[in-house]
Image (cartoon, grey):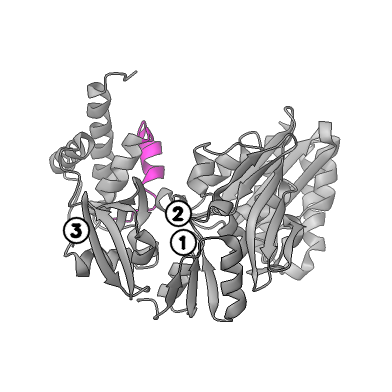
Amino acid sequence: MKAAAVDYVRPRGLAEAVDLLNASDEARVIAGGQSLLALMSLRVASPGLLIDIARLPELLRVADHADAVIIGACVTHAAIEDGRVPDPSRGLMPRVASTLAYRAIRTRGTIGGSLALSDPAAEWPAVLAALDAEVVLYGSSGRRSLKCAEFTTGIFQTRLAHNEIIESARVPKLSADARCGYVKLARKSGEFAGALAVAITDPRRGYSRVVLGAANGAPLVLADTSRLVAEGRCDPDALRGTIGGDLDRASDRHFDEFQRGLHMVAAMRAVRQVLA
Amino acid sequence: MTAIRLRVNGAVMADDVPPRLSLADFLRERRNLTGTHLGCEHGVCGACTVLVDGEPARSCLMLAVACDERAVETIEGFAGDPVMAALRRNFHQHHALQCGYCTPAMLITARDLIVRERAGSEREIRAGLAGNICRCTGYTNIVTAIAEAAKEIGKEAPNAQ
């Protein structure tokens, strides 16, 4: 199908983009458009005005600080995949990017767009939550930062207000001896995940976290499994039991037996990559 | 209507377009460049893949207005491009198409894989083609053709390992 009629504007700066959002309830921000234009073609979304932010210099900035890398919201998955932006994650983020949809999508799709939509099966919300990243939001009353783990609140649900735009993600740098595990289970390369697990342990910073994506809601932090990873233990039965306990406590996600099995396998494999 | 000015296959063109017009429809209906095919029109099949500023992109998932001041290459371009010439020759020799509907985008995607050195093994080629659906060939001959083209280009390249 074809998208419904829409107006289009390309603001020159972030402040102007926010003013445009403030002026219209029908306005939507478009960056890479790799989800929004598909939804418009299917007439699931019919915004009245598209505000194209893809080329705003403020959103393409990348800054390499001592303890974190700031990645502008409109940096593409392909730029991360190719290492064209500094990597705070010792290879995890480029590896994730290379599994995200297809190259022709990655060249246009953006990290900020992925967070803003927060498709439950998307990679960045889970991976950035696992990395303890923050998202920086820009609105008419200024900037605010939220932990990515708290930014996504449910299926396609976030704390982003209508008149706010994601400016950047602030991703803490992993130490040299940090380890990362990443497993995406999908029936076909590039498809959205059926299950997605990220495991990180960074003993020098005293940080460990295991997060599931595609989890019928916001990224799911496996609290007990994260503690087990911090202890560096890898007894398979203990690991299985601990992940199982974390999954049981997430009863609000209503995993069926098949989903539970997929999440278990993904989490087991991701943790083994970390503790191997 | 929004005024745009872009480069298509090297030629600068200006037009007034409704914002909802996709790049694919702009190319096909306004420029008669019908080598860019539309399958699903929502980013799944890959048949509409073109190059935008040198990188592959779904022309059904780009608005023509967003291509203002950008450079687009379609299958009608690539004259004198040695990688595309090798691919076309090998697609022909290895019978890498039947109905041909996916072929323009397969060629553009394959060219990108070879240029980015992501066509070094069957596994790599198959992963790189995951976003381009072919319903005729079973992919076997497409993969063979790309592997052979990559080998030819590798031999020709002065710095090839």
Q: Where is residue A135 in the image (x, y as percent from the top left)?
A: 70, 55
Q: Position of residue A219 (x, y in %)?
A: 70, 58
- Are marks 2 and 1 in one subunit? yes
Which image quarter holds the N terminus of chain B?
bottom left
| SS type, badge 3 | loop
Q: Can residue A131 be seen in this view?
A: yes
Q: Name the residue under label 3.
A: B35
Q: Name the residue under label 1.
A: A34
Q: Is residue A180 left or right of residue B117?
A: right
Q: How many marks?
A: 3
Which image quarter holds the C terminus of chain B?
top left
Q: Earlier in the sequence, mark 2 or mark 1?
A: 1
Q: Which chain carries label 2?
A: A
What's the residue type where badge 1 is placed? Gln
> B11 or B60, which lies in front?
B11
Q: How far apart are marks 3 and 2 (CA)?
A: 22 Å
Instruction: Report the residue at 59% width, 54% height from top.
Output: A73
Instruction: Report the residue at 68% width, 46% height from top.
Output: A198
- The span picked out in magenta is B116-134
| SS type, badge 1 | loop
Q: Is residue A262 visible?
A: no
Magenta stretch, main secondary structure, is loop
